[in-house]
Amino acid sequence: MKVLVTGGTGYIGSHTVLSLQEAGHDVVVIDNLVNSGEESVRRVAELSGRTPEFHNVDLVDEAALEDVFAAADFDAVIHFAGLKAVAESVREPLKYYYNNLVGTLNLIRAMDRHDVRSLVFSSSATVYGEHNPVPYVEKMEIGANNPYGRTKEQIEDILSDLGGADQRWRIALLRYFNPVGAHPSGRIGEDPQGIPNNLVPFIAQVAVGRREKLMVFGGDYNTPDGTCLRDYIHVVDLAEGHVAALNHVAEPAGIFRWNLGSGQGSSVLEVIRSFEKAAGQPIPYEVTARRPGDLPAFWADATSALADLGWATTKTLDQMCEDHWRWQKNNPNGYGT
């Protein structure tokens, strides 16, 4: 298939582009490079032996997006592009609603004009909000509790309404949990801009000497060791999940929702210990007060993805940390090395 990947230079996007090319698909990438760089495209080409076509395009630029669709005959779209920092979304909600919602509306309008109606959307476990018990199951009523999560929820609503109104659409909504790790080559990985928002890239930057220590927010939760539990998934497993979803929506019409996760939680301290083992050095950390809005624990029920897609995670937490450390060690300043 000829597949358009929006946000394809980012962390998850670049790994998915590589998996798509390894599966034999023809990939076109668009990205505005706000939170990433074109170096990831060059490294994907190095690993796959094929250079994906790249366009520096912002989805809110409807004319530029139309040019991309007019120049190619796409079979499907995988949609990653969007702003993604929870804390920033709380500070600047209008920025998030404009970018994520308008960009998506422009994309699906362009798809409709060009008769492209197979779509895999990068949603998030944040749509489940604070009210649902764990593990999270796709049939639960969703209700995100921050602007970033609400943009994902609202896009899911838009796509669900679209699919209900027009039976030609085939749409997969992928709710995934905590992606970590990197390609085992160490050539592509996570390169957060500024201070990392997530646990493992912060640990990696401490291990490589870019940061002094890790702050662990809360050590008194009702969990086995007092720290938060999260469902971590290797980014390569996650990329393969997108390829499996793409294959599924190639034929049957409808709206499909799948959790992509491991189905189990790992605590902050467990992740630290695993990364210390991978890096062969201690990770200095300090336990401090809880962070507002953090849930004690959440993880996926991923049985639907296994039943429908034949997909399940294959890599352990230790493998995730080993691959993430290899990437960070080989690229201490990310793609800017």
Image (cartoon, rainbow, N blue to C red):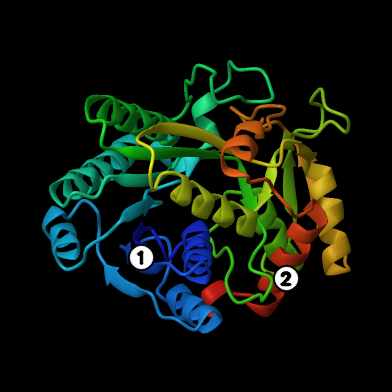
Give the residue at x 42% y 71%.
Answer: 37
Under circle 1, the secondary element is loop
- Using the image as rendered, state which of residue 79 and residue 3 is in the foreground: 3
Give the residue at x 72% y 46%.
Answer: 215
Q: In the image, is residue 220 above or below residue 53?
A: above
Q: In the image, is residue 55 above or below residue 138?
A: below
Quadrant location of the C terminus in the rendered image: bottom right
Tell me if mark 2 has few (under 14), some (14-19) or many (20+) residues whose alpha carbon lies within 10 angstroms of its own: some
**Number of the label disc, if any, that sits on residue 208:** 2
- Give coordinates of residue 303: x percent, y percent: 66, 32
Q: In the image, is residue 197 above or below residue 255?
A: below
- Give coordinates of residue 124: x percent, y percent: 50, 38
**Number of the label disc, if any, that sits on residue 309:** none
Identify the image quadrant of residue 42: bottom left
Report if residue 193 is visible in the image: no
Q: Which amino acid, by three-letter code, is at mark 2?
A: Val
Identify the image quadrant of residue 202: bottom right
Identify the image quadrant of residue 102: top left
Q: Which amino acid, by three-letter code, is at mark 1?
A: Leu
**Number of the label disc, if any, that sits on residue 33:** 1
**Could you tell me if the residues under marks 2 and 1 are in contact, i.e. CB atoms within 8 Å?**
no
- Give coordinates of residue 195: x percent, y percent: 56, 56
- Give coordinates of residue 196: x percent, y percent: 58, 55
Quadrant location of the N terminus in the rendered image: bottom left
Give the residue at x 58% y 20%.
Answer: 130
Q: Is residue 253 left or right of residue 174?
A: left
Under circle 2, the secondary element is loop
| Residue ranking furthest to the front | 251
Report if residue 169 is visible in the image: yes
Tell me if mark 1 has few (under 14), some (14-19) or many (20+) residues whose alpha carbon lies within 10 angstroms of its own: some
